[in-house]
Amino acid sequence: MAKSSFPSGGGINLPPLDTVLQQLKSLLPIPILATIGFAAFTSFYTVQPEEEAVVKRFGRVIDINPPGFHLKVPFGVDRVHVVPTARVLKEEFGFRSINTGSRTQYVKNSEHRGESLMLTGDLKVIDVEWVVQFQIADASKYLHASRNPIQTIRDNSEAVMRRIVGNSLGSDVLTEKRVQVATAARLELQDLLNSFNLGVQINTIELQDVTPPETVKPAFNEVNQAEQERERLINEAEKRRNQVIPRAEGQALQIIAGAEAYRAERVNRARGEGGRFTAILSEYQNAPAITRQRLYLEMIDQVLPKAGPVYIMEDGVSSPIPLLNLGQSGTALPIEGGK
């Protein structure tokens, strides 16, 4: 065994050089094996279902891989960012739902209330709670178009909802136009995010709860009752108008039709009488005596039926002799002396 070349005076005993070299040779495989193990560990990755992996090499996107087992360059050369593209994500506004394990707990505090308090077009304050459900359509755009895509979605959703509610009546948002408000907000938010090239698809926007604030609920209820009473009175007036006006119009048409019929009857009768008189005049001019006698007989024919019973009273006869039995009622017309 070779001796050490270091001086022995000094109180330090060093091992021989060949011993040190042999120990270094025995320790050399350890870092090599560690390097190989680390390289093997960092050269593969697994993408779960409902996810996609964006692979970046030195900051540049080189691939987007679907679910499954994949390989990459180790030692941090390739970096993998997993994005849940097939999962439906949601953002809540005005409240938070916290999953405690057994059940979901509804939480609403002053910070959340600041998101939901809005002013309507008729200057009413309402509390609007809504949920935005979306999916990531493009993983690369989602990662690189915005520094904080979730906050971008929240800020734009709140701005869109405030604008739409601000242009609507409070009663409409509270009652029958909630679906229209949610639909308009979804379309406008989608257009806005598309302009940002965010790579997000908005599925639905649901208005969870729309109520007046607690401090103004009594006054708000009184206003709603007054508006409902006004609508009731208007509806009753419209019902009465729909009943009276058609009836009056029908009566007016009936009166007009009767007047037209009476006018036509009078005109036709006058024309007929005028034509008859003209015809009689012509006959009278041709034969006055005969025409006069005929007119007399026609008049008698019209008058006698209305005269009633006619009796002949003869001198020396105790009872009258009936001449004509024209009816049972009426006053007897005595004719003395057979005249």
Image: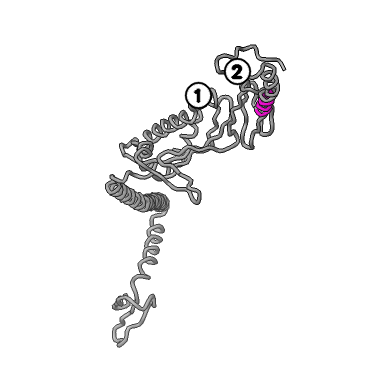
Above/below status of 318 relative to 56? below
Please state the horizontal and vertical placement of residue 240, each as a whole percent of the image.
34, 53
Provide the residue span drawn in magenta: 32-41
Location of residue 86 (image quadrant): top right
Quarter of the view holding residue 57: top right
> Marks 1/2: CA distance?
19 Å
Amino acid under disc 1: Ser
Along the viewing direction, whichever of 115 and 265 lies nearer the viewer: 115
Q: Residue at x 39, y 61 (%)?
A: 293
What residue is pinned by disc 2? 58
Tag 2 or tag 1, which sits nearer the N-term? 2
Q: At 44% from the left edge and 48% from the top edge, which residue is drawn?
A: 105
Q: Position of residue 262 (x, y in %)?
A: 38, 53
Label 2: element kind: loop
Task: Look at mark 1 in the image and give the residue it sits on.
Answer: 146
In-front residue for pair 151/11: 11
